């Protein structure tokens, strides 16, 4: 049997303290320990410290837990376990190179210097020799928690940077570069699958008048709401981005000319049917839309710039014919050149 540290009777009582009902808000820890008494003690300590605990009795069960996408980021592993020992488990964790990082504290009765080196080289972050004091364990866990908290902060910062790089700051939809990249990706997919592809160029009607009448802050609110309504009116696999100024580009994969008109009319009504609420009061807004499609049998001829030129020409026609309307470019093989 493993050597177990002595502790007061009250320390081994299972005090839930109402924490398990909020497991999603708690830190999580995996405890892998084959001694049932010591495993129970560790569970009690970690629950008292505010952790949601998953406890297993062998290395194979621990590995099954750690392979899951929502696995605990903190793992307390005993060196000597049936099935797979702590050293082999550490090696598997590091070989998997899983994100986010898993912090591993290795527990053992081995206290030889070479054993410490072996454990750390296998991938353990820290090492604690039995018997140990509960306060020392908690201090080491706190050190690991600081590292995990730092990792979480860095990951949030990275995600924020990635979002900012691909999204328009005002409207929070895709920016020009990102929507054009998505458009290029849909062109490649359409070529592979011999599928149709449509795009919609959108322009906010008389936007300069909105700015001149109500000011640029109100104009910003109008653009934000237009972007939101466009995005919320699309299918999950469609995309919309701010192309520039008051112009938006909508990419609609797998959509022929007739269905693209239906989709565009739906977007037009989403904008026109309800004024935008602003600090200056309700502001009526309409949009003009220019459509261009490449049919499935012509997917090999899609050219990004050529298709945008067709949609731009259709948008110009919509504005010339009174605005607040949808116009489609003629489907023309001559306008499509293989160049992506």
Image (cartoon, rainbow, N blue to C red):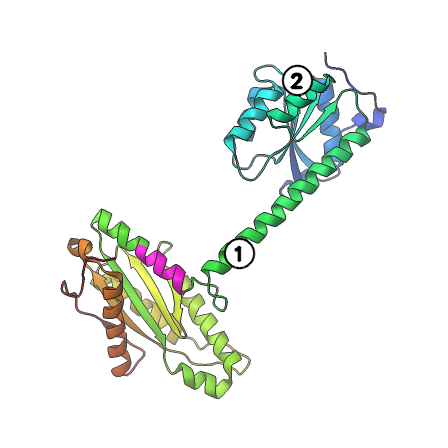
Q: Is residue 105 left or right of residue 248?
A: right
Quadrant (top left, top right, bottom left, bottom right) of the C terminus? bottom left
Along the polypeptide, which appears first: circle 2 or circle 1?
Answer: 2
**Above or below for 51 versus 129:** below
Q: Residue 251 in magenta?
A: no
Q: Which residues are magenta?
A: 176-184
Residue 65 position, x and y percent, is 56, 29
Nearer to the camera, 272 or 48: 48
Q: What's the residue at 79%, 26% (across, down)?
A: 12
Helix, strand or loop for the magenta stretch, by majority: helix
Quadrant (top left, top right, bottom left, bottom right) of the N terminus? top right
Hey, which quadrant is residue 265 in on the image? Answer: bottom left
Label 2 Cα crowd, 10 Å radius (few <14 / some 14-19 / many 20+): many
Query: Which residue bears the numbered disc 2?
Result: 34
Count of marks, rendered view: 2
Q: Is residue 338 left or right of residue 221?
A: left
Nearer to the camera, 110 or 295: 110
Residue 233 in view, yes or no? no
| Dot 2 and dot 1 residues touching (CB under 8 Å) | no
Q: What's the residue at 32%, 61% (across, down)?
A: 251
Residue 161 position, x and y percent, is 53, 56
Q: What's the residue at 46%, 65% (across, down)?
A: 168
Residue 176 in view, yes or no? yes
Q: Distance between the Cα atoms at labels 2 and 1?
A: 44 Å
Identify the secondary structure beneath mark 2.
Answer: loop
Q: What's the residue at 27%, 51% (across, down)?
A: 188
Q: Is residue 24 left or right of residue 325?
A: right
Q: Which mark is residue 161?
A: 1
């Amino acid at each position: 049997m493993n050597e177990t540290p002595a502790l007061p009777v009250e320390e081994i009582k299972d005090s839930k303290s109402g924490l398990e009902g909020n497991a999603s808000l708690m830190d999580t820890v995996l405890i892998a320990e084959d001694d049932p008494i010591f495993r129970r003690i560790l569970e009690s300590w970690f629950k008292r410290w505010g952790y949601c605990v998953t406890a297993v009795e062998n290395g194979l069960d621990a590995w099954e837990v750690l392979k899951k996408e929502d696995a605990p980021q903190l793992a307390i592993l005993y060196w000597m376990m049936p099935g797979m020992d702590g050293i082999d488990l550490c090696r598997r964790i590091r070989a998997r190179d899983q994100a986010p990082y898993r912090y591993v504290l290795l527990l053992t009765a081995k206290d030889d210097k070479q054993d410490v080196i072996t454990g750390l080289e296998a991938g353990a972050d820290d090492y604690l020799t039995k018997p140990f004091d509960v306060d020392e364990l908690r201090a080491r866990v706190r050190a690991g928690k600081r590292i995990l908290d730092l990792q979480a902060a860095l990951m949030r910062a990275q995600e924020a940077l990635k979002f900012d790089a691909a999204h328009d700051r005002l409207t929070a939809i895709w920016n020009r570069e990102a929507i054009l990249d998505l458009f290029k990706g849909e062109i490649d997919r359409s070529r592979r699958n011999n599928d149709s592809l449509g795009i919609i160029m959108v322009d906010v009607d008389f936007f300069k008048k909105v700015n001149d009448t109500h000011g640029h802050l109100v104009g910003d609110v109008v653009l934000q709401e237009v972007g939101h309504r466009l995005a919320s009116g699309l299918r999950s696999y469609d995309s919309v981005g701010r192309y520039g100024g008051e112009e938006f580009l909508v990419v609609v994969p797998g959509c022929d000319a007739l269905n693209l008109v239906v989709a565009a009319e739906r977007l037009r009504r989403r904008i026109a049917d309800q004024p935008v609420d602003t600090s200056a009061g309700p502001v009526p807004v309409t949009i003009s839309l220019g459509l261009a499609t490449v049919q499935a049998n012509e997917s090999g001829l899609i050219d990004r710039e050529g298709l945008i030129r067709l949609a731009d020409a259709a948008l110009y026609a919509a504005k010339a014919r009174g605005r607040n309307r949808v116009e489609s470019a003629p489907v023309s093989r001559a306008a499509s050149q293989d160049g992506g």
